[in-house]
Amino acid sequence: MMIPNVDIATRVYNHKWKIDPIVRSLIDTDFYKLLMCQSVFRNRPDTRVTFSLINRTTGIRLADLIDEGELREQLDHARGLSLTRGESTWLRGNTFYGKRQMFRPDFMEFLENLRLPAYQLEKRDGQYELTFEGSWPEVMLWEIPALAIIMELRSRAVLKDMGRFELQVLYARAMTCLWEKIEGLRGLGPDLRIADFGTRRRHSFLWQDWCVQAMVEGLGDERFIGTSNCLIAMRRDIEAIGTNAHELPMVYAALADSDDELRQAPYKVLADWHEEHDGMLRIILPDTYGTDKFLEHAPDWLAGWTGIRIDSGDPVKGAETAIRWWQDRGEDPREKLIIFSDGLDVARIRELFAQFHGRVKVSFGWGTLLTNDFRGLVPGDGLAPFSLVCKAVAAEGRPTVKLSDNPEKATGPRDEIARYRRVFDIGRQTAFRVEV
């Protein structure tokens, strides 16, 4: 089903949220969330989990920018959403990664009856404390809508006093900027593989949809391989892209009853995943508790998986580590896939492609700087992207921890971070500035 193109500037100028809500579908979310939700529904359906909003860019005081009433209206609207018949049919019958009926009937029945659970919202020190508590399969589906709502309300707050022509010029400049990026990627040739990973920190739904259309036209479906956004994938008839994320090992680890169980938790996650998926869905995300130690202690069967996603730290170091790991286990790196997905823009994509093309299969998940790059386009740079996340912070009352390959991305109580660093034998790490 195709949807018509829209005049984004006019739509922004005439914004009335009730006819143009920020989240307009339960599948206006990332594909990996649905894949993970099915895994959780199968393996840990009764686990109680808490998710919280975390603004890493504390200089942006969201509670001073975004009206609380508008935020509650958008959150309440998302709570009222349910799968439409067409969306259910697409999920049940479409082919994802070459597999039909990716989603089992029992999970689809759960999803068709789902409404997002309640939320708690408070203001503190210029920030919103937004929290979701409940059963893991239900609560986890708040992550992407919550982030999209906050990000777009921030965009709307910055743009609200702009006139019609000012908005037209703004979006014309943003479109030109993106098209120049696409032209910069064309020079990488026919072997480029890149996907849209920009749902969670997009400028708006309409802008993400425009960016995807531009990528399709500018790069073609051989190089632009799809979008993480399920609604856009369905409406634009392109591939839905995604595998798994840090959430799974974070919660499994929090549920561990001993240090030994904690060490094994990241591998238990992938053992469960191995039972459900094959092929392109067998992608390792190794950095939750440090890539080096994860690979050093990984069971040999993981080396047979399709590839690795690099999402923090020095991407060159991470890729070289993965290549050596495969070689040491008798695998041919040229047959393996490395997906780069951390803070990408054209210069970094070109650099990484040049360095690793031919040595491995290279792919890119392009996020914030695809769908939310308005840097320098408004006074005071008020639309510059910033780092906002919504993470699982507790499971069954126990705090969760993420270490990452970049200590600036670490989350969790200080004493628990220290414990996890000891258990996973994490040595000195290099800090990188977190911008998106």
Image (cartoon, rainbow, N blue to C red):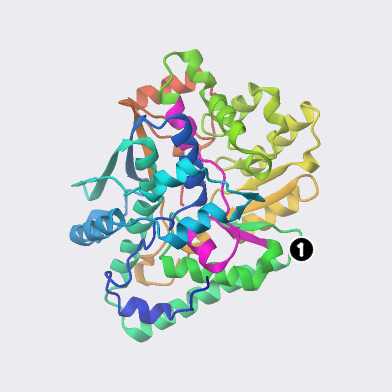
Task: Please tell me in which quadrant of the rendered image residue 212 appears.
Answer: bottom right
Examine the rendering and report whether any part of residue 229 can be seen: no
List x then y, in percent, for residue 17.
Answer: 28, 69
Which residue is nearer to you in this view: 337 or 5? 5
List x then y, in percent, for residue 191.
Answer: 76, 58
Examine the rendering and report whether any part of residue 257 can be seen: yes
Which residue is nearer to you in this view: 341 or 249? 249
Give the crowd class for mark 1: few <14, some 14-19, many >=20 residues within 10 Å.
Answer: few
**82 horizontally vs 335: left or right:** left
**11 horizontally vs 16: left or right:** right
Residue 288: within the magenta? no
Which residue is nearer to you in this view: 244 or 239? 239
| Residue at the outermost bottom position | 165
Q: Image point 35% across, 34% down: which residue?
A: 393
Q: Image point 57% across, 33% down: which residue?
A: 273
List x then y, in percent, for residue 188.
Answer: 73, 62
Against 286, is 166 above or below?
A: below
Residue 234: within the magenta? yes
**How many marks on residues?**
1
Query: Which residue in the structure is indicated by mark 1?
Result: 190
Against 111, is 249 above or below?
A: above
Task: Please tell me in which quadrant of the rendered image residue 21 appears.
Answer: bottom left
Q: Amino acid at mark 1?
A: Pro
List x then y, in percent, for residue 193.
Answer: 68, 57
* Residue range (magenta): 224-252
Asked which secondary structure carries label 1, the reply is: loop
Against 39, is 267 above or below?
A: above
Which residue is nearer to you in this view: 253 or 174? 253
